[in-house]
Amino acid sequence: MLDKLKNAVSGENQVYLGSKKVEVKKLTPNLWKKLFGTVDRLPGLIVQVILAPKEDFYSYVISAAEIAMDEVVQVVSVLSGVDEEYLKENAGLDDIVNYLVKTVKKNNLHEAIKNVKSLLPDVNQKTEKQEAL
Protein backbone atom coordinates (compact mmCIF):
# COMPACT_ATOMS: atom_id res chain seq x y z
CA MET A 1 0.00 0.00 0.00
CA LEU A 2 2.86 2.34 0.79
CA ASP A 3 4.35 1.69 -2.68
CA LYS A 4 1.04 2.59 -4.35
CA LEU A 5 0.88 5.86 -2.41
CA LYS A 6 4.51 6.67 -3.25
CA ASN A 7 3.90 5.95 -6.96
CA ALA A 8 0.75 8.08 -6.98
CA VAL A 9 2.59 11.05 -5.48
CA SER A 10 5.68 10.72 -7.69
CA GLY A 11 3.75 9.97 -10.90
CA GLU A 12 6.25 7.18 -11.53
CA ASN A 13 3.62 4.94 -13.12
CA GLN A 14 1.98 7.63 -15.23
CA VAL A 15 3.01 8.70 -18.71
CA TYR A 16 1.68 11.07 -21.34
CA LEU A 17 0.93 9.60 -24.74
CA GLY A 18 0.24 12.75 -26.70
CA SER A 19 -1.96 14.76 -24.35
CA LYS A 20 -3.51 11.69 -22.69
CA LYS A 21 -2.24 10.76 -19.26
CA VAL A 22 -2.14 6.97 -18.91
CA GLU A 23 -1.27 4.53 -16.17
CA VAL A 24 1.56 2.05 -16.71
CA LYS A 25 -0.22 -1.24 -16.08
CA LYS A 26 0.76 -4.49 -14.45
CA LEU A 27 0.93 -7.19 -17.12
CA THR A 28 -1.69 -9.74 -16.14
CA PRO A 29 -2.08 -13.09 -17.94
CA ASN A 30 -5.07 -11.69 -19.88
CA LEU A 31 -3.11 -8.61 -20.95
CA TRP A 32 -0.16 -10.84 -22.00
CA LYS A 33 -2.54 -12.88 -24.13
CA LYS A 34 -3.85 -9.75 -25.88
CA LEU A 35 -0.30 -8.46 -26.26
CA PHE A 36 1.00 -11.60 -27.96
CA GLY A 37 -2.05 -11.58 -30.23
CA THR A 38 -0.81 -8.26 -31.67
CA VAL A 39 2.84 -9.19 -32.14
CA ASP A 40 2.97 -10.95 -35.51
CA ARG A 41 5.85 -9.69 -37.57
CA LEU A 42 8.18 -8.16 -34.98
CA PRO A 43 10.15 -11.32 -34.09
CA GLY A 44 10.63 -12.18 -37.78
CA LEU A 45 11.78 -8.65 -38.56
CA ILE A 46 14.39 -8.80 -35.82
CA VAL A 47 15.74 -12.08 -37.22
CA GLN A 48 15.84 -10.62 -40.77
CA VAL A 49 17.84 -7.61 -39.57
CA ILE A 50 20.27 -9.81 -37.63
CA LEU A 51 20.80 -12.11 -40.64
CA ALA A 52 20.91 -9.31 -43.23
CA PRO A 53 23.94 -9.27 -45.53
CA LYS A 54 26.44 -6.64 -44.39
CA GLU A 55 26.07 -4.57 -47.58
CA ASP A 56 22.25 -4.43 -47.21
CA PHE A 57 22.09 -4.02 -43.44
CA TYR A 58 20.90 -0.39 -43.38
CA SER A 59 18.18 -0.94 -45.98
CA TYR A 60 16.94 -3.90 -43.91
CA VAL A 61 16.90 -1.75 -40.76
CA ILE A 62 14.96 1.05 -42.46
CA SER A 63 12.40 -1.36 -43.94
CA ALA A 64 12.01 -3.22 -40.65
CA ALA A 65 11.63 0.02 -38.68
CA GLU A 66 8.82 1.17 -40.94
CA ILE A 67 6.92 -2.11 -40.57
CA ALA A 68 7.73 -2.49 -36.87
CA MET A 69 6.45 0.98 -35.98
CA ASP A 70 2.86 -0.06 -36.73
CA GLU A 71 3.25 -3.11 -34.54
CA VAL A 72 4.86 -1.12 -31.71
CA VAL A 73 1.93 1.31 -31.83
CA GLN A 74 -0.46 -1.67 -31.64
CA VAL A 75 1.39 -2.99 -28.59
CA VAL A 76 1.23 0.37 -26.83
CA SER A 77 -2.46 0.68 -27.72
CA VAL A 78 -3.22 -2.72 -26.18
CA LEU A 79 -1.16 -2.01 -23.06
CA SER A 80 -2.40 1.55 -22.49
CA GLY A 81 -5.96 1.32 -23.75
CA VAL A 82 -5.39 4.37 -25.97
CA ASP A 83 -6.74 4.16 -29.53
CA GLU A 84 -4.16 3.21 -32.17
CA GLU A 85 -5.10 6.06 -34.51
CA TYR A 86 -4.78 8.59 -31.67
CA LEU A 87 -1.28 7.30 -30.93
CA LYS A 88 -0.24 7.50 -34.61
CA GLU A 89 -1.42 11.10 -34.85
CA ASN A 90 -0.58 12.50 -31.41
CA ALA A 91 2.02 10.51 -29.49
CA GLY A 92 5.68 11.25 -30.05
CA LEU A 93 8.26 8.52 -30.43
CA ASP A 94 9.71 9.65 -27.10
CA ASP A 95 6.28 9.18 -25.44
CA ILE A 96 5.96 5.66 -26.86
CA VAL A 97 9.49 4.60 -25.90
CA ASN A 98 9.08 6.09 -22.40
CA TYR A 99 5.83 4.15 -21.93
CA LEU A 100 7.46 0.88 -23.01
CA VAL A 101 10.51 1.44 -20.77
CA LYS A 102 8.31 2.14 -17.75
CA THR A 103 6.21 -0.94 -18.53
CA VAL A 104 9.34 -3.11 -18.61
CA LYS A 105 10.53 -1.63 -15.30
CA LYS A 106 7.18 -1.83 -13.51
CA ASN A 107 6.75 -5.47 -14.49
CA ASN A 108 10.38 -6.39 -13.78
CA LEU A 109 10.57 -8.09 -17.18
CA HIS A 110 14.36 -8.49 -17.11
CA GLU A 111 14.10 -10.67 -14.01
CA ALA A 112 11.06 -12.52 -15.36
CA ILE A 113 12.94 -13.42 -18.55
CA LYS A 114 15.91 -14.70 -16.54
CA ASN A 115 13.58 -16.81 -14.41
CA VAL A 116 11.81 -18.28 -17.44
CA LYS A 117 15.17 -19.11 -19.04
CA SER A 118 16.21 -20.93 -15.86
CA LEU A 119 13.12 -23.15 -16.18
CA LEU A 120 14.03 -24.24 -19.71
CA PRO A 121 16.32 -27.22 -20.28
CA ASP A 122 19.94 -26.39 -21.01
CA VAL A 123 20.49 -27.29 -24.67
CA ASN A 124 24.28 -27.46 -24.30
CA GLN A 125 24.05 -29.81 -21.35
CA LYS A 126 21.68 -32.10 -23.26
CA THR A 127 24.07 -32.20 -26.23
CA GLU A 128 27.01 -33.10 -23.98
CA LYS A 129 25.01 -35.98 -22.43
CA GLN A 130 24.07 -37.29 -25.87
CA GLU A 131 27.71 -37.19 -27.02
CA ALA A 132 28.78 -39.12 -23.90
CA LEU A 133 26.43 -41.95 -24.81
Image: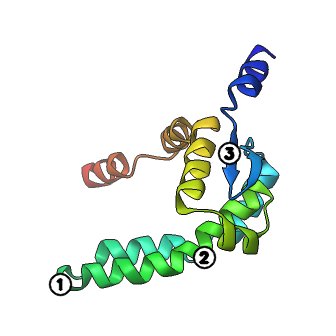
Which residue lies at the image location 40% right of the left edge and 73% below the top edge? 47
Q: Which residue is mark 3?
A: 15
Which residue lies at the image location 58% right of the left edge and 62% below the top edge? 92
Foreground residue among 115 and 58: 58
**Amino acid beneath label 1:** Glu
**Amino acid beneath label 2:** Asp
Mark 3 lies on a secondary structure that is strand
Distance of mark 2 from mark 1, alpha carbons? Answer: 26 Å
Q: Which residue is mark 1?
A: 55
Dot 2 or dot 3: first in sequence order is: 3
**Amino acid beneath label 3:** Val
Mark 2 lies on a secondary structure that is helix
Q: Residue furthest left?
A: 55
Dot 2 or dot 1: first in sequence order is: 1
Report x, y in % for residue 76: 67, 60
Q: Is residue 47 left or right of residue 55?
A: right
| Dot in front, 3 or 1 | 3
Which residue lies at the image location 44% right of the left edge and 79% below the top edge? 64
Q: Which residue is mark 2?
A: 70
- Look at the picture and state if 70 lies above or below 36: below
- Look at the picture and state if 18 lies above or below 46: above
Mark 1 lies on a secondary structure that is helix
Q: Residue furthest front?
A: 19
- Look at the picture and state if 83 lies above or below 124: below
Q: Is residue 64 left or right of residue 56?
A: right
Which residue lies at the image location 76% right of the left edge and 48% below the top edge? 22
- Bin the neighbour count of mark 1 within 10 Å (Cα to Cα): few under 14, some 14-19, many 20 and up: few
Q: Residue furthest top?
A: 2
- Look at the picture and state if 64 lies above or below 110: below
- Whether pointer 2 and pointer 1 mark residues with C-beta atoms closer than 8 Å, the reply is no
Distance of mark 3 from mark 1, alpha carbons? Answer: 39 Å
